[in-house]
Amino acid sequence: MSAHVVRRLVLLALMIVLSVLITLVNPLFLSTGNLLKMLQEAAQTGIVAVGFTLVMITAGIDMSIGAVIAVTSMVSINFISYTKLPVAVFVPITLMVGVLAGAFNGFFITRFKLPEFIVTLGTKSILSGLALVIAVKDSMGFVQNVYIQNESYLWFGSQTFGGIYRTTIAFVILGVATQLFLKNTRTGSYIYASGANPTAAKLSGINTEKIVFGVYVFSGLCASIAAIFISSRMMTAMPELGLGQEMDVIASVVLGGTTFAGGSGDIWGTMIGAVFLALIKNGILKLGISPWVQPIVIGGIIVVTVILDVWQKKIADKLATRAKLRKLAEASAQPAA
Amino acid sequence: MKTEHKSDILLECRHIVKSYNGPIVLDDVDFSVKRGEVHSLVGENGAGKSTLIKIITGATDRNSGDIVFNGQALPLQYSRKFAESLGIAVIYQELSLIPGMTVAQNIFLSREPLYPRTRIINKKKMNVMAQELIDRYNFPLKPNDLIDNISIAQRQLVEILKALSGNASLMIMDEPTSSLTRTEVEMLFKIIHTLKSEGISVLYISHRMEEVYALSDRVTVLRDGKLVSVLEKEQISPAEIIRLMIGHRLEENAVHHHLPKIEGRKPVLEVEGLTSVGKFADISFTLHEGEVLGIGGLVGSGRTELVRALYGIDPYDKGSIRYLGKPWVPSVHASIRSGIGFIPEERRIQGILATQTITRNIGVTNLDRLAPRGVVKSRQEKQLAMDGIRLVNVKPPDPEHLVGNLSGGNQQKVVLAKWLVRNLKLIFIDEPTVGIDIGAKEEIYGHIRALAEQGVSVILVSSDLPELTRLSDRVLILRKGRIIKEFKECVLTSEKILRAASGILEEDDEA
């Protein structure tokens, strides 16, 4: 059984154990309504995490996703407040925010060989400022909380048959499609190659710059898609929306088994990771613990997961060298005999 | 112009000249490979082998000279990808496969079979194609195995298949056996014979003379960037190749060094039966006060691993060590405190802090004295740096100069200086003069000899044979992790060292 499978089974087992424990304290946890809400929250983080997974497979990181969410929702709010354009027209335009932000990131990372962390952190700062600038203001110049009343915009965050949120459905479709794309297409395998061994990838004729550029564009697009669903669900949007969301996203991806070193991981893992994280957050509320604890727990999860990953790798390496030494000892014993 | 398309010469290089801003690395070299032959390229370190390979594979350009491959004249500068598309494949020393991917994915990377009119990979077909290739050469591989889970020898086979599936007609193998076991080497040899029978040429580079002897149809010998000789099959013998590689340099340098008697001096380091599985085995020797003990052997013979274990960087499995007459368990910390120094093999990676000043570089190994309570006494640190600079004559003699901006020779002097300012009793020195100009080399030799005269014991590991013969009082030769020869109180020449290291033992070695 591969390490990936083991990891997933452990996560699923942990989820079951945690669910039982939480239910014992607060039976409301197991109610259909709560579970649907939990999955919807997992989806809001998960949609962003799908794009982020691809970035991490290429050994990169995208710190700008939270700010992309903020700007995207501000652009939406502007369209809703000041225009009468139909949703089908302005939502695609809105999604361009993420595409452009991703292209900006990808351009500086591939063209000038700048560190991913610095470039995307810069983008994050620029975009969070931009979100404030374009926010809808009142006559005094204060940022105004706009309540979204556009019915067709609210459709995105609403529930459908059986009470399932459309966000959840979108997440599943996006996740499955991306997973199939990663594992079955040429571009998908180039994404892994670019992260695992960029030199070898280049020598094999892969245009790794193009791959990396594309991955950041996709990450930005995913963040923008998530922004539509989040603002629609909240029926409003503030310029701070999504800021800090990076942490939840990183935690989901890392929990799912994608490593910072790049070259490994997949979307199935990320999807499980997102649900696991939503369960933890929901559980904290259901247990009556202060929600302020959430960031502490999320940070802790990231660190512990990375430590476990390193340990697992170390143990595997140790076993491998031991096997090799035994083989060598046998080989060197032969001529002596 | 008519080009002879099916001539039996596959690759022809004429009058190749290459210089890296200044020193000439390849000087008017002719080189050719016939179709379906195994051709070995030999020469000492720095003879120009790797530069020639880099030029052929497109990793670097050449200043002048012609290269004709398969009837096509190649431009002065071309990319690796271009060379690969012509059929020039390299089996890299550091493997260039993608971890996390399967054997089949690696073989067909960027040439994956697709479903018609899509970008979706036809995995079934890809695995079948891989299986066909594997069966054709009868390799112990499975298309679905992950690269991470197979041995280094198997990975090499994957690289070979990758090259074959790309229709390679020339396969360059650079020290392919350096990390293979005996049976794996035999398997590789069989494969090379199969390749040959299919008309594929193999350009083989190895320090191991017995392999060159066993495999080659022809051998080209390079020395100091010049072509020395091309040997035909019947002329090839290990002793002859070594003679040609070393040439007349012995006479030129007149380093028929007489190793002096060293008996009667106090022992400093006594090593008994030291063994580290897979690295070295059963190493015993005694190092005396003021003695320079040279350790020779081919790359991969366990030299570096031995000194690293003796200094306390890596653990060992068996054996005992006595230092200054007392039982000794090495650790880096204890070594430094007890007057043992270490100059590592790779200066840029292991020896210097490139982005720091000379002062900091010298200070960092002396913090026990400079900062006994944790705070660095900067005046003393600077004084120490000035002392060091004066001792080894660093240019420029500016303690605030960044070490990364110094020449290679001066960087190495700084590394030397940080130990010289201490009270040493013993120092391990690994390849002290790689990539250093002659002037600085001489200065470093002077310092090493001076250390010995002051009573410091030195263990010197080097691939530079004249360096070993000149500096050492005694030389141990390692081969496959064991001491196979000790030279003392005799006339020592480069040729003798290389013969011993290559495993050619002979009667007249006794002196």
Image: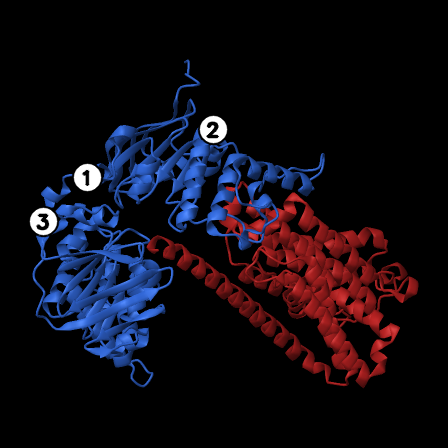
Image disc number at residue A314 = none
**Chain colored red:** A
Q: Nearer the viewer, residue B128 or A160?
A: B128
Q: CA distance from mark 3 to mark 1?
A: 16 Å
Residue annotated with mark 3: B256
Q: Which secondary structure lies at badge 2?
A: loop
Q: Earlier in the sequence, mark 2 or mark 3?
A: 2
Residue shown at 67% from the left, 50% from the top: A182
Is residue B314 visible in the rendered image? The answer is: yes
Q: Respond whether the residues carrying marks 2 and 3 are from the same subunit.
A: yes
Q: In the image, residue A4 lies at what x, y percent? A: 64, 61
Colour of chain B in the image: blue
Residue annotated with mark 2: B198
Chain on which label 3 sits: B
Rendering colour mode: by chain
Q: Few, some or many C-alpha atoms within 10 Å of disc 2 (few <14, some 14-19, many ≥20)?
A: few
Indicate the quadrant where residue B351 lies. bottom left
Q: Is residue B106 left or right of residue B381?
A: right
Under mark 1, the amino acid is: Arg
Q: Nearer the viewer, residue B141 or B368?
A: B141
Asked if marks 2 and 1 touch (Cβ < 8 Å), the reply is no
Q: Nearer the viewer, residue A95 or B35?
A: B35
Looking at the image, which residue sits at the far top? B2
Q: In the image, residue B416 lies at what x, y percent? A: 22, 65
Q: Earlier in the sequence, mark 3 or mark 1?
A: 1
Residue annotated with mark 1: B243
Q: Is residue A284 left or right of residue B105?
A: right
